[in-house]
Amino acid sequence: MRPVGRTGSRVRVDATCATWTRRVAGGSATIGSVTTAARPAATVLLDLDGTLIDSAPGILGSLTAAFDELGIPLPEGGLPRTLLGPPLYRSLPALVGTDRAPEVLAAYRRIYGDAGIRECIPFDGIDVLLRELAGDGVTLAVATSKAQVYAEKIVEYRGWTALFATVCGDTLDAARPTKADVVGEALRRLGGPTDAIMVGDRLHDVEGARTHGLDCLGVGWGYAAPAELEEAGAVAVLPDPEALGTALLRARTGAGNPTSGTVVG
């Protein structure tokens, strides 16, 4: 399996590493120096955009079409990839103003619902990873800031519906405006598991997980800026789905503990 996305200057994990470590004051600390409690990852909450699928073409393409339809000029340099992750109703006012944001959002949702959701390609190795985790008995759930109605369509379109215990997202009327709200609802649906871990590609995933006492594994192939996940407090940043699977399944079998510190490859 080829590596996915960039690693750059990120702290990263090698799937063959035998010892989990993290950077401390420019050096590294072994697992014995880390105080986070070991929690086997029997329940895994997964972000969708930038974690399971490359949704940038569908989202940014649909948003570009909405701007064009409404005669709104694009920002210089085009739409920023930082739009990917948080809800658009929170990001659009800074781009188009509070007066025009609702009509842009409405046009975007229509265009995205018609065509954009089909422009979502799983990252290399994700399909294999999900089926491997589900086959090993791990409870999987989607926890995304995308509107749930679209997330459910994408999961169904990719043939993943049977792999997930629930697909949780925001509502079209913004009833779950933060990632913490989404994570909380996903945990409620799952019966409040105490063995859960979050996996995501943006700082919002880390912060939302922390609100509910969960650790978060970051993925290095998504839409985060360099060092964003590390600075937010992700306990590890994985370079590809194969490494993520190794980390999660190692924790599942007790051979390692990905919730105990950032792994330096």
Image (cartoon, grey):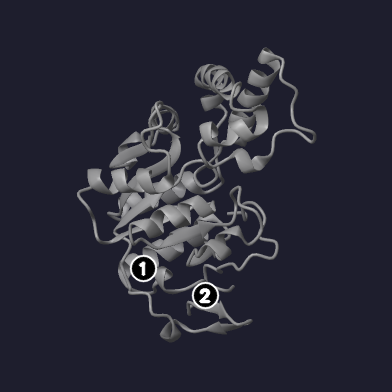
In the image, is 11 to the left or to the right of 184? right
**In the image as oriented, which residue stretches furthest toward the front?**
99
The residue lying toward the viewer, choosing from 98 and 187, is 98
Q: Position of residue 82 (x, y in %)?
A: 63, 43
Circle 1 is placed at which residue position?
251
Q: Position of residue 79 (x, y in %)?
A: 70, 34
Above or below residue 33? Residue 207 is above
Above or below residue 74? Residue 37 is below
- Give residue 198's quadrant in the image: bottom left
Quadrant into which the C terminus falls: bottom right
Residue type highlighted by circle 2: Cys
In the image, is 253 to the left or to the right of 154? left
Distance from the alpha carbon under mark 1 to that under mark 2: 13 Å
Residue type highlighted by circle 1: Ala
Circle 2 is placed at which residue position?
17
Above or below residue 25? Residue 219 is above
